[in-house]
């Protein structure tokens, strides 16, 4: 007889979330309980990258798409995708070393790689989700994807750039290297996970 199956809330996935193609890499390391749904994970990523949740998103795991589902009364089909609110991490066959994709904003197309670094047991001394580490600020919304982001940084650094004034008026102060785990964790404290 095998050991009893762990409760979803007692299984912790240590995830490394990075924006594909960013250089220097924009990334976060977050511990998330197995009971979290993909909808929960979307909220976690939004807070760790300081996104504003203005746009559509999707996950792709084992060649299957997961998205939020439109209300029935809108009569919309979400491209044959599974309902992200019904998909818990513990049920997705995720093992250490596996990875999947999260795309935010179908215009700017921010592609994130989510790699499972470890599968751990819950530490009763910790509150989850928790962000342990990361580097670089999350890019601002509606900047035009990676290409637009790097164009913005170039313009902000060069007072002679033709778009310098436009970006300084729009962004005011921006430090691309600013990552504050404490601020991220304050945002994460507002998340109530499914099944909690």
Image (cartoon, rainbow, N blue to C red):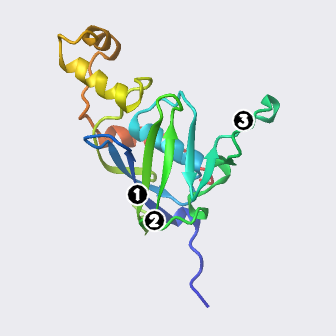
Instruction: Identify the mark at residue 24; answer none if there is no mark.
Output: none
Q: Which residue occupies 35% across, 13% down?
A: 170
* Residue 56 rendering spot, x and y as whole percentages: 58, 33
Q: CA distance from mark 2 to mark 1?
A: 8 Å
Secondary structure beneath label 2: loop
Secondary structure beneath label 1: loop
Q: Which residue occupies 34% across, 27% down?
A: 149
Badge 3: few (under 14), some or many (20 or more) residues near its Cα, within 10 Å?
few
Asked which quadrant contains residue 25, the reply is: top left
Badge count: 3
Residue that mark 3 sits on: 70
Asked which quadrant contains residue 71, the reply is: top right
Residue that mark 2 sits on: 122
* Residue 105 rendering spot, x and y as whole percentages: 51, 32
- For the N terminus, the image quarter is bottom right
Secondary structure beneath label 3: loop
Mark closer to the observer (3, 2) = 3
Badge 1: few (under 14), some or many (20 or more) residues near its Cα, within 10 Å?
few
Name the one closer to the observer, 141 or 14.
141
Q: Sequence order check: which comes first, mark 3 or mark 1?
A: 3
* Residue 77 rendering spot, x and y as whole percentages: 74, 37
Residue that mark 1 sits on: 126
Q: Is residue 49 above or below residue 158?
A: below
Is 168 left, or right, of 41 in this rendering?
Answer: left
Q: CA distance from mark 3 to mark 2?
A: 34 Å
Q: Is residue 189 visible?
A: no
Badge 2: few (under 14), some or many (20 or more) residues near its Cα, within 10 Å?
some
Q: CA distance from mark 3 to mark 1?
A: 35 Å
Q: Are marks 2 and 1 in contact (CB under 8 Å)?
A: yes
Mark closer to the observer (3, 1) = 3
Q: Sequence order check: which comes first, mark 3 or mark 2?
A: 3
Is 94 left, or right, of 65 in this rendering?
Answer: left
């Amino acid at each position: 007889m095998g050991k009893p199956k762990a409760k979803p809330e007692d299984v912790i996935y240590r995830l490394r979330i990075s924006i594909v193609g960013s250089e220097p890499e924009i990334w976060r390391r977050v511990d998330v309980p197995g009971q979290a749904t993909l909808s929960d994970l979307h909220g976690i990523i939004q807070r760790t990258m300081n996104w504003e949740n203005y746009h559509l998103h999707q996950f792709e795991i084992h060649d299957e798409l997961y998205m939020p589902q439109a209300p029935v009364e809108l009569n919309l089909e979400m491209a044959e995708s599974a309902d992200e609110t019904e998909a818990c991490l513990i049920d997705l066959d995720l093992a250490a070393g596996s990875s999947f994709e999260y795309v935010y904003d179908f215009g700017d197309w921010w592609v994130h790689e989510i790699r499972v670094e470890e599968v751990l047991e819950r530490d009763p001394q910790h509150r989850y989700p928790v962000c342990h580490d990361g580097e670089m600020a999350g890019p601002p919304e509606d900047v035009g994807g990676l290409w637009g982001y790097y164009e913005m940084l170039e313009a902000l650094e060069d007072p002679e750039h033709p778009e310098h004034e436009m970006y300084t008026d729009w962004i005011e102060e921006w430090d691309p290297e600013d990552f504050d785990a404490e601020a991220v964790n304050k945002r994460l404290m507002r998340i109530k996970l499914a099944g909690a």
